[in-house]
Amino acid sequence: MFWGFELFGFWMVFWWIIFLFIGYLVYQDAEKRGMNGLLWFILVILPMVGILFLIIYVILREVSPRESEEHNKALEILKERYARGEITQEEFQKMREELER
């Protein structure tokens, strides 16, 4: 009986470590995206509902800040080229549509 309890305790500790590690990864990702990392960490490690909140986090997380910044920078360069007369209005519209996809 003692051996069974000890084995059960090992698996509980093992799963807690896994949940804490996943929570830590979610915390880091949320902080990078300007979201409340501590809140998402706590929600992810809660027993029984942590997986549900992990799925919700993955769905709700915003676009990577780096991707958003790159898109804005490309659009600014395009606007500058149009303002300087380097490209026509038709070229500007076509390139802007391509960037927005």
Image: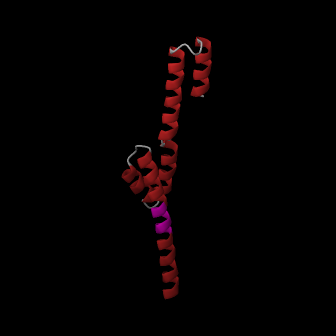
Point out residue 61 in the picture as x, y percentages from the top left corner: 48, 43
Q: Is residue 2 above or below residue 53?
A: below
Work out whether residue 1 can be spotted.
no
Quadrant the C terminus occupies: top right
Task: Pinpoint residue 51: horizontal percent, then vertical percent.
Answer: 50, 55
Residue 32 on the magenta span: no
Left or right: 99 in relation to 30: right
Spot occupied by residue 95 in the image (x, y as percentages of width and height) = 60, 22
Residue under the image location 50 percent in, 71 percent down: 14
Q: Nearer the viewer, residue 34 or 18?
A: 34
So how many labels did they put on this image?
0
Magenta part mainly helix, strand or loop?
helix
Which residue occupies 46% across, 67% down? 16
Residue for point 62% across, 16% down: 91
* Foreground of the two, 21 or 64: 64
- The answer to whether one can see residue 84 in this image is yes
Q: Which residues are magenta?
A: 15-21
Q: Give the vertical position of 39 relative to 91 (above or below).
A: below
Return the x and y of residue 99 as percentages of the image width and height: 58, 27
Residue at x-position 41% and y-position 55%:
41
User: Viewer-proximal residue, 43 or 66?
Assistant: 66
In the rendered image of this protein, does residue 6 appear above or below residue 58? below
**Scheme by which the image is coloured:** secondary structure
The residue closer to the viewer here, 8 or 18, is: 18
